[in-house]
Amino acid sequence: MTVGCFLLLDRQASDNSTGVKMNGAPVDLSFKHISNLTDAWSVEPTRGLRPLKRNSEMKYNSHSLRLNNNNIVDLDKLQMTINHFLAEPSQLAWLDLSFNKITHIDHVLCELHELRVLYLHGNSIFILSEVDKLGVLPYLHTITLHGNAIEANKSYRKRVISALPRLKTMDFSAVTQQERVMANIWYHNNNHRRNSLDTLQ
């Protein structure tokens, strides 16, 4: 099979869990020294092996966005940034925010309803319970959070798996059926303990 055939297959590949097409190459804004997301609007995406295609409004026909390896702290303008670059912003399925300086899981991430893959590893997220917010994303099946302060919590993996019921891969490692069962047991035990404490107060 020729290289061209491989690229064509890659371009037309679907997300197996939902059938969504991951159209085109990712819009790659990694390693651009971006501190504020508004700064990204004037940045030209890095060209990869596959050319980025644009529509008549000069927006990119892609469902993937890379913002990794920058200095981003605040995600307040994330939706505006997605709108700026993508022809179909509501169809964003793959987002890489790894290796930045993000400290919180911002509510804006919960509004990306078509998101399947989210990379947040190598940041400074320190409140494990904030992962619960992402449970509203109906298609999220892959997440990375290692390299954050929350990884030191002894319940880290159980908490994330219990919070995200459709998760198939966490930190580049498959979520097993046994892990899912153990995470559910952990969740119910913790809930029971919290409810007991609330009753005593």
Image: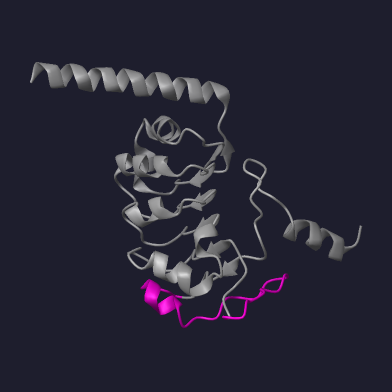
- Give the residue at x 67% y 65%: 24
Q: Is residue 164 magenta?
A: no
Q: Which quarter of the image is occupied by the C terminus?
A: top left
Q: How many marks?
A: 0
> Looking at this view, is 131 or 31 the one in front?
131
- Within the image, what quadrant is residue 168 found in? top right
Residue 61 place in picture, x, y as percent: 62, 69
Q: Which residues are magenta?
A: 33-57
- Give the residue at x 63% y 40%: 17
Vertical comparison of 147 with 177: above or below: below
- Give the residue at x 39% y 72%: 37
Residue 199 place in picture, x, y as percent: 13, 17
Q: Which quarter of the image is occupied by the N terminus?
A: bottom right
Q: Is residue 3 left or right of residue 132?
A: right
> Looking at this view, is 103 or 54 the one in front?
54
Residue 94 place in picture, x, y as percent: 55, 55
Vertical comparison of 159 with 181: above or below: below
- Give the residue at x 34% y 19%: 188
Q: Residue furthest front?
A: 56
Helix, strand or loop: magenta stretch: loop
- Within the image, what quadrant is residue 174 found in? top right
Q: Is residue 55 magenta?
A: yes
Residue 89 place in picture, x, y as percent: 51, 64
Looking at the picture, the colour scheme in use is one colour
